[in-house]
């Protein structure tokens, strides 16, 4: 499966029910190559050091407002 995702301005905090540890994640939205809409919670993202990291950082700062579907992230979607 391939997905194309876009960075949004929304972040959420996931809490591990056992350890109570917290992880802040950015919400990304997109779709699969067959058109299925997806929402991703991504805590970290990096690029290899031999890439153009200036360009990567600039693109990472580009964020759009989340869609209405992401405003209430359903817990059933969290694996």
Image: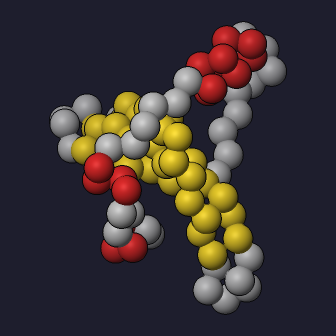
In the shown orientation, is residue 14 left or right of residue 27?
right
Count of marks, rendered view: 0
Colouring mode (rainbow / by chain / secondary structure / one colour): secondary structure
Query: Which quadrant does the C terminus fall into?
Result: bottom left
Quick check: 23 left or right of 26? Answer: right
Above or below: residue 69 compared with residue 53: below
Residue 40 visible at all: yes
Looking at the picture, tell me which residue is in the foreground, 12 or 78.
12
42 vs 34: above or below: below
Name the residue located 70 percent from the left edge and 21 percent from the top edge.
57
Compared with 19, 55 (above or below) is above
| Horizontal arrangement in the rendering, residue 6 relative to residue 45 (left or right) | left
| Residue 29 % position (x, y) | 38, 41
Q: Quadrant of residue 33?
A: top left
In the rendered image, the quadrant that contains the N terminus is top left
In percent of width and height, residue 62 lies at 55, 24
Locate residue 64, reporting x and y percent: 45, 31
Q: Residue at x 29, y 50 (%)?
A: 68
Q: Can you give x and y, in whole percent of width and height, for residue 17 in the image?
A: 61, 86
Q: Is residue 18 above or below residue 40?
A: below
In the image, taking residue 44 as reference, residue 7 lies left or right, namely: left
Q: Which residue lies furthest to the bottom in this view?
A: 18
Given residues 23 and 34, the one toward you in this image is 23
At 70% from the left and 27% from the top, the residue drawn is 47
Q: Is residue 1 visible?
A: no
């Amino acid at each position: 499966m391939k997905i194309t995702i876009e960075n949004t301005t929304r972040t959420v905090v996931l809490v591990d029910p056992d350890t109570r540890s917290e992880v802040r994640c950015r919400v990304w939205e997109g779709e699969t190559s067959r058109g299925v809409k997806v929402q991703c919670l991504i805590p970290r993202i990096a690029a290899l050091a031999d890439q153009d990291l200036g360009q990567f950082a600039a693109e990472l700062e580009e964020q759009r407002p989340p869609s209405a579907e992401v405003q209430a992230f359903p817990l059933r979607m969290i694996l």
